[in-house]
Amino acid sequence: NAGVTQTPKFRILKIGQSMTLQCTQDMNHNYMYWYRQDPGMGLKLIYYSVGAGITDKGEVPNGYNVSRSTTEDFPLRLELAAPSQTSVYFCASRPQEGTGNTIYFGEGSWLTVV
Amino acid sequence: AQSVTQPDIHITVSEGASLELRCNYSYGATPYLFWYVQSPGQGLQLLLKYFSGDTLVQGIKGFEAEFKRSQSSFNLRKPSVHWSDAAEYFCVLNFGNEKLTFGTGTRLTIIP
């Protein structure tokens, strides 16, 4: 069972560079999410999607973009990386039926901007 | 406003001792309640969840949690901790929409 797969696991970026964090899930979940985790801050929602072609901003969307062309994939794009984007990023998904359904997380992507 | 609070940032317990991690929320109704665990360098794993029914919920790894409506709490407990329980624990709530709200987490340290 692959579940939610994120790549890369580790990446070092220089200030001003761009990159894409990939996320794919094989559970046919409609809802997908990107979170960032900073020490002592819990997880903050960056963007989310309720289905292919539909995305919406979360709490901390500035500096990021997303797309959802298929049900399976939900890439997160960082444009003009800044040190403030040094964080751990988690992709997650869950089925649409029942808002209390379990959310499944990827293993995380550690990003450092220098 | 809807919110979730984990009052303890860091807890240290001895191996074999009992554990209780606190979680309180603010909401006008009963939310969907989850506890997740994050081991160092890993993703988040679901320990247990509560939607309705019996207010004492059993989870994986010997954990349980009790929902108390009168106290707006969903505290996580384990009668005897193991060194492998050292991790970060997150109380997570869904307030009836597509989003989840995370507590800030409690870091658990186990001493021999």
Image (tube, coloured by chain):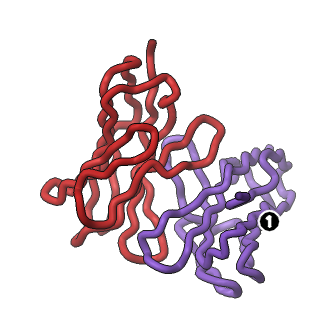
Chain colours: A purple, B red
The image quadrant of residue A50 is: bottom right
Query: Which residue extends farthest bottom?
Result: A53
Q: Identify the residue at image location x=62%, y=47%.
A: B43
The answer to whether residue A79 is above or below residue B67 is below
The reply to whether residue B104 is in sight is no
In which quadrant of the rendered image does the C terminus of chain A lie?
A: top right
Residue A33 lies, in percent from the top left, at: 61, 68
Instruction: Looking at the picture, tell me which residue is in the foreground, B62 or A81.
Output: B62
| Image coords of residue A5 (percent x, y) | 74, 58
**Towards the viewer: A43 or A85:** A43
Does B55 sit left or right of B60 as displayed? left
Q: Residue at x 84, y 61 (%)?
A: A19
User: At 46% from the left edge and 69% from the top edge, which residue is drawn?
Assistant: A101
**Residue B108 horizontal side relative to residue A64, left or right:** left
Q: Which residue is mark 1?
A: A79
Residue type, label 1? Glu
Whether residue A57 is visible: yes
Question: Quick one: which residue is furthest to the top in this view?
Answer: B112
Q: Is residue A4 above or below residue B61?
A: below
> Residue farthest to the left?
B70
